[in-house]
Image (spheres, grey):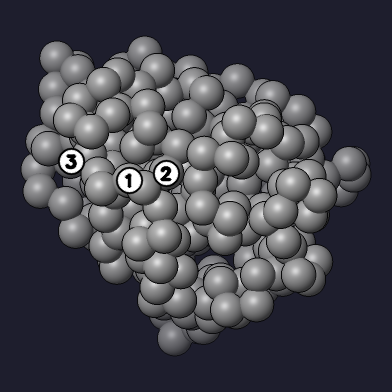
Amino acid sequence: MTDETLTDDAPADGETTPTDPATRRSTVREEYGSIASTNGDCCGGENASATDDGPAAERACSVGYDAADLEGAPDDANLGLGCGNPIAISNLEPGETVLDLGSGGGFDCFLAAREVGPDGTVIGVDMTPEMIDTARTNARESDLENVEFRLGEIEHLPVADGTVDAIISNCVVNLSPEKPRVLAEAYRVLRPGGTIAISDLVATEPLSEELREDPEAVTACVGGAATIDELERWLAEAGFVDVSIAVEGEWVPSDETPVVSARIEGRKPA
């Protein structure tokens, strides 16, 4: 594929907008760096405590996690940023190598590490230094030795070709201004037969230009939501088969913002 094929939402020559890849990536990095530093959440809340009665715990339970999941990760790993539970749909096996795209505080990584066991490995990749610092601190405070966190962009994964059995992600791919490239990178690092299982937000119809260029909507995981048709096409172009995108529930209850949570799955041919 060419770079043109792999880049969506490109601005006109000389134009800089929130959908310009560099500008948008910088905006997202700044926002999520602040979240990591303050334990806020991506939807405007503050002090999103990961304790059993805090907002982050409430949000996690509302999107498919349970009390055992919250107890299975360090207290500060759950920042309340997800829109689903990718672990529940990933069918992880002991001994596998798992990659989390946009790992944040490491919540899903720690849950995946328990699924794959001591013979498995979990790699979290995040482009935000503050998130990586938070995740590494959480790792040091956990009893798990099979988790590592790498600073990098999901459009340019710091992972070797064909070394990963399963890819997970939770409400992150929508933040990328270059989603086809993300999916192509995911395909590259997967072993033949490897799977991708993503919880993310999708648009049931094309979003307005105004919404797509609104920085607050982008960082709130709404403005960058791709349509289901777009995601199906990009997954197929990357090489994935057995692609499935299943809507799980309404996310933004507004006729003007047709965004829903969904499970996105695919497999690299063996």
Residue type at mark 3: give it: Val
What amino acid is at disc 2? Answer: Phe
Q: Which mark is residue 189?
A: 3
Residue 204 position within the rendered picture, expressed as x and y whole percent measured from the top left:
70, 33
User: Left of 262 or right of it: where is 168?
Assistant: left
Q: Amino acid at mark 1?
A: Leu
Assess whether mark 3 and mark 1 are in contact (beta carbons under 8 angstroms).
no
Secondary element under disc 3, as helix, strand or loop, is helix
Picture disc at residue 144 = 1
Residue found at the far right of this picture: 254
Mark 2–mark 3 distance (CA, rounded to whole Å): 21 Å
Q: Position of residue 95 (x, y in %)?
A: 20, 25
Q: Residues within 10 Å of mark 3 (few under 14, many from 20)?
A: many
Q: Are marks 1 and 2 in contact (CB under 8 Å)?
A: yes
Q: Residue at x 10, y 48 (%)?
A: 160
**Circle 2 Cα neighbour tier, 10 Å, few/some/many (<14 / 14–19 / ≥20):** many
Marks 2,3: beta carbons within 8 A: no
Q: Which mark is residue 110?
A: 2
Q: Which dot, 1 or 3, sits closer to the camera?
A: 1
Counting residues from the start of the chain, the first of labels 1 and 2 encountered is 2
Q: Earlier in the sequence, mark 2 or mark 3?
A: 2
